[in-house]
Amino acid sequence: MISRQQLIQQIKQKKTFLCVGLDTDVDKIPEFLKEYPDPAFEFNKRIIDATKDLCIAYKPNAAFYESRGMKGLQSLISTYEYLPKDCLSIIDAKRGDIGNTSDNYAKAFFNEDVTGMGFDAITVTPYMGNDSVTPYLKYDGKWVIILALTSSVGSKDFQYLNTGEGYLYETVIQKANTWAGVDRLMFVVGATKSTEFTNIRQYAPDNFLLVPGVGAQGGSLEEVCKYGITKDCGLIVNASRSIIYASNGEDFAEAARAEALSLQQQMQAELEKAGVI
Ligand SMILES: O=c1ccn([C@@H]2O[C@H](COP(=O)(O)O)[C@@H](O)[C@H]2O)c(=O)[nH]1
């Protein structure tokens, strides 16, 4: 379990707010790993070893594991067990359903005694409202990360709809912030929407924001920080493909480290500029 205070402390100590996304596609990992009993886990293990001093969070995306059935689930459980305990573990599952179903999704990813997975945080879609989100909040100390303004092109289809009181994504943030405090609730905001961060900070001045979309999707870390960083940092910036697939040769872990190091150095400069460290 990682509290808000511990998260801020990790960011200051490690001088980074990088989240490494473990979107591990077995068709994209180096050939030589395929001889191992669990190639996806072997890949993740080496990525984690190569990056753990440069990041404060890891985010396996459930889709890449669930799509492989039982084998994928085992890779996910083994990866969860291997994650460094000082890093925030986020399962990017984007769940959302009626209460009793959400209870079971929460159990699947939070109840380590039952499933072998006790992630610190889960991404949740807000579309079904309060009763679809509260089951995750029953787990003391666990984080719920609500999709607010996504990095996708399709974000315009619903998230920018005018509710009469502003954009739908603004309503999502305001409403969700009545369900739990900033010690339990984060929001997903895509790096490709960096100019919206000033607006988002009006509604979420102190929430941590999980920001995917730098690297492969072309979002700018500098712009995200310009409009989104707070005195506590308030940002967890994710990069998946640009780090884990920096090379598909035997040097993949070294190449991943080089990418992560470059982001960490930019993040350190931003933390200094904002007076966080
Ligand atoms: O708005 C969103 C929400 C989630 N994601 C997820 O983040 C990573 C991004 O991967 P990259 O390879 O760095 O582009 C991936 O797991 C997405 O499902 C997002 O991109 N945008």
Image (cartoon, rainbow, N blue to C red):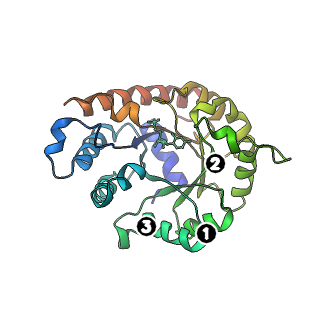
Q: Position of residue 177 (x, y in %)?
A: 70, 56
Q: Which residue is mark 2?
A: 207
Q: Which residue is mark 3?
A: 108
Q: Is residue 120 above or below residue 228?
A: below
Of the pair 273 and 33, the residue shown nearer to us:
33
In the picture provided, is 199 more to the left or to the right than 141? right
How far apart marks 3 and 1 lie (CA) works out to 15 Å
In front: mark 3 or mark 1? 1
* Circle 1 residues within 10 Å: few <14, some 14–19, many ≥20: some
Three-letter amino acid code at disc 2?
A: Asn
In the picture provided, is 103 more to the left or to the right than 44? right
Q: Which residue is mark 1?
A: 98
Whether residue 69 is visible: yes
Q: Residue at x 53, y 52 (%)?
A: 5
Q: Residue at x 56, y 70 (%)?
A: 138
Q: Residue at x 50, y 56 (%)?
A: 122
SS at mark 3 in the image: helix
Q: Position of residue 30 (x, y in %)?
A: 22, 35
Location of residue 72 by image quarter: bottom left
* Circle 3 residues within 10 Å: few <14, some 14–19, many ≥20: some
| Dot 3 and dot 1 residues touching (CB under 8 Å) | no
Of the pair 255 and 182, the residue shown nearer to us:
255
Three-letter amino acid code at disc 3?
A: Ala
Determine whether the beta carbon of the residue marked 2 sits less than 8 angstroms from the nearest atom of ligand 1: no
Count up the numbered dots. 3
